[in-house]
Amino acid sequence: MGDQGPTPPIWLLPEPPERGWGLGRVDIVNAAVRLADHGGAEALTMRAVAKELGASTPMSLYRYVHSKDGLVDLMLDLANGEVRTPEVPGEDWRGELTAVAVDTWAMTKRHPWYARLVHQRPPAGPNASRRTEFVLATFDRLGQDLASALGYARLLDGYVTGQALQWAEERAMWQRNAFVDVVDVQRQARAWFGDVVSEDGPYPLLVRVLESFLSERHDAAGESGAVSADGGGPDVEPDASGRVAGAGKPGARPGAEAAGARRVVEADRELAGSAQVAGSGQEGSGQVADAHAPADARTVAEAAAEDAQFELGLECLLDGIAARLR
C-alpha cells in the first residue's frame, strides 16, 4: 500500500457498478469463500478468484471489490452473517452469549481461514457490527459502563477467535502430514517417542499423558469407542453445522446445552442464495461450496470432543464474568 496508507473498509468506498458480463460482487465473494474453504487463506489470490469465475483477468474484479483487502472485508462479513444474533438482549444473558459464541465457533470451523484473516481488517462490516452491538448491549443491560462492556466483549471474542485459530492450525498440521485419523497420530508419536519416554525423567506428568494417549483404543470395539480404525465413529450424527448434538459438558449452565445442541445453519440453507452480501445490494445465486461439510481428517467423535472442550472453556470464562458482575 506504500504511501497511500491503510485501505479503508470497503463500506466506506463507492458502491460497485451494476452487474455486467455475468459478473457481480456476490459472485466474486462466493468464489473467494469457496477457494479459501478448500485451500485456506494462502489460496486466496485475485488471480485464483478470477480463474474460479472464468474471468479473463484479475483486473476485472477490482471494479467490484476495489482491492484484495476489500474482498477480505466482504468474505469476513459474509461469514459473520452465518452467526445468529438476537436483536435485543433478553433475560438469560448467559444462555444468549453462549449461543452466540457457539454459533461463532461453528462458523469458524466451517471457514478455517476466518480466524487467520479476521484481525487483518477493521471489524467494520454490518454483520460483525451487529454481533458486537448485541454483546455490548447485553453488558449495558447488566449495568456495566461502556469500558467494562467493551472489555468483556473483547474477552469473549478473544476466546472464540483464539480457539478457532488453534483449531485451524492443528487442522492444517494434520493435512500437511497426511494424517487421516487419530490412529495415524498415535502411529507417528509411537515412532518418535515410544522407546524413549521414561517417568524417571524431568517431565513425569507429560510422560504419563503421552503413555495414556498411546495406549488408548481407537477401534470399533475399543474401550474409548471414540474412533474406529477405518476412520468411522460411534453411533452419533453431526448436525448441519458439523457439530454433534449434546456435545456440551454435562451440567452446563442454563442455555449452554441448548446452544450446543441446536443447529447453527439449517441443512437446506443456501448461504449465498439466502444471504445478501453486505453493501452489495445484490442477492446471491449459488450455495457456498462445502459450507456444511465436516472438517476433513476429523471424525464425528473428535468433533464432539472439540466442541465439548470449547464449551467447557466458555463456561469457565462466563463463570469468571458472572463472579465480577455480582
Image: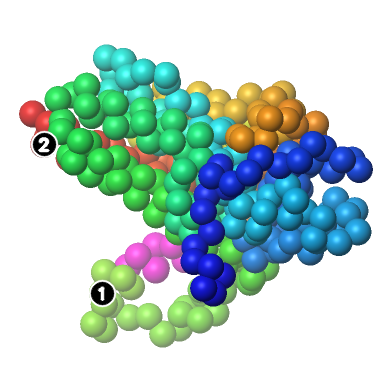
**Taking 90 as reference, is 232 left or right?**
right
Secondary element at image label 2: helix
Q: Amino acid at mark 2?
A: Arg
Furthest toward the top, the residue is 91
Quarter of the image with the N terminus in it: bottom right
Circle 1 is placed at which residue position? 204
Residue 208 appears left or right of 188: left
In the image, which disc is placed on residue 324?
2
Q: Quadrant of the C terminus?
A: top left
Asked if residue 131 shows in the view, the reply is yes
- Residue positioned most to the left: 326
Residue 86 horizontal side relative to residue 262, left or right: left
User: Tags 2 and 1 in contact by the CB under 8 Å rule?
Assistant: no
Q: Residue 205: x and y, percent? A: 26, 69
- In the depicted view, which residue is nearer to us: 175 or 222? 175
Q: What residue do we see at 53% from left, 68% from top?
A: 4
Residue 26 inside the magenta-drawn segment: no
Q: Residues within 10 Å of mark 2 (few under 14, many from 20)?
A: few
Place of residue 126 in the rendered image (x, y in percent of width and height, measured from the top left): 51, 34
Q: Secondary structure at mark 1?
A: helix
Examine the rendered structure and indicate whether residue 177 appears above or below residue 240: below
Q: Eyeballing the image, is 122 above or below 243?
A: below
Tell me which segment is drawn in magenta: 208-218
Residue 324, horizontal then vertical, whole percent:
11, 36
Examine the residues drawn in magenta and state their main secondary structure: helix
| Residue 211 belongs to the span the image colors magenta | yes
Which amino acid lies under the numbered mark 1 shown in the image of this protein? Pro
Q: Earlier in the sequence, mark 2 or mark 1?
A: 1
The answer for how far apart the CA atoms under marks 2 and 1 are is 37 Å
User: What x and y, as percent, mark residue 185?
Assistant: 56, 66
Q: Observer-nearest residue: 59 or 264? A: 59
Q: How many marks?
A: 2
